[in-house]
Image (cartoon, rainbow, N blue to C red):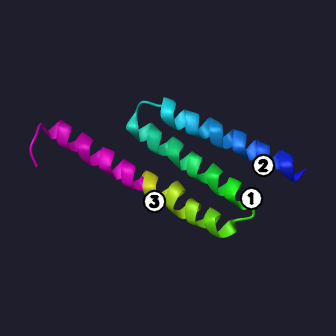
Amino acid sequence: MTDAVIVVALLLVAGAATGAVAVRDPARQALVLSVLGTVLAVLFTVLQAPDVGLSQLAVGSALTPLLIMLSVRKVRRRRRSGDGTR
């Protein structure tokens, strides 16, 4: 039973990672990266590392995608204003 859960979690990680690489839009990449972080947190929990899973949930699912989304928003705002400098 445990081996089947690990295999399913690994397949989900592989699918989410492939999705993160395949998506071209940075905003959508951030969302897929959030899903990947969540799936990795589940995998770490299944592998009996709940402390690593909680850290991954905080950093990989929330903080990193948030920083990417804020960066994309700022870059897009600068493009719209036509200001190529700072």
What residue is at 64 percent from the left and 70 percent from the top?
Answer: 51
Element on which disc 2 rests: helix
Label 3 or label 2, whichever lies nearer to me, is 2
Amino acid marked by disc 1? Leu
| Disc nearer the start of the sequence (1/2) | 2
The residue labelled by disc 3 is 63
Q: Residue 85 vs residue 45: left or right?
A: left
Element on which disc 1 rests: loop
Q: Residue 38 vs residue 1: left or right?
A: left
The residue labelled by disc 1 is 47
Residue 58 belongs to magenta span: no
Element on which disc 3 rests: helix
User: For mark 1, does the 10 Å Cα neighbourhood hold few (<14), some (14 to 19), or many (20 or more) residues?
Assistant: some
- Residue 77's label in the rendered image is none
Percent x, y of residue 20: 51, 37
Q: What separation in Å lies between label 1 and label 3 (alpha carbons)?
A: 23 Å
User: For mark 3, does the 10 Å Cα neighbourhood hold few (<14), some (14 to 19), or many (20 or more) residues?
Assistant: some
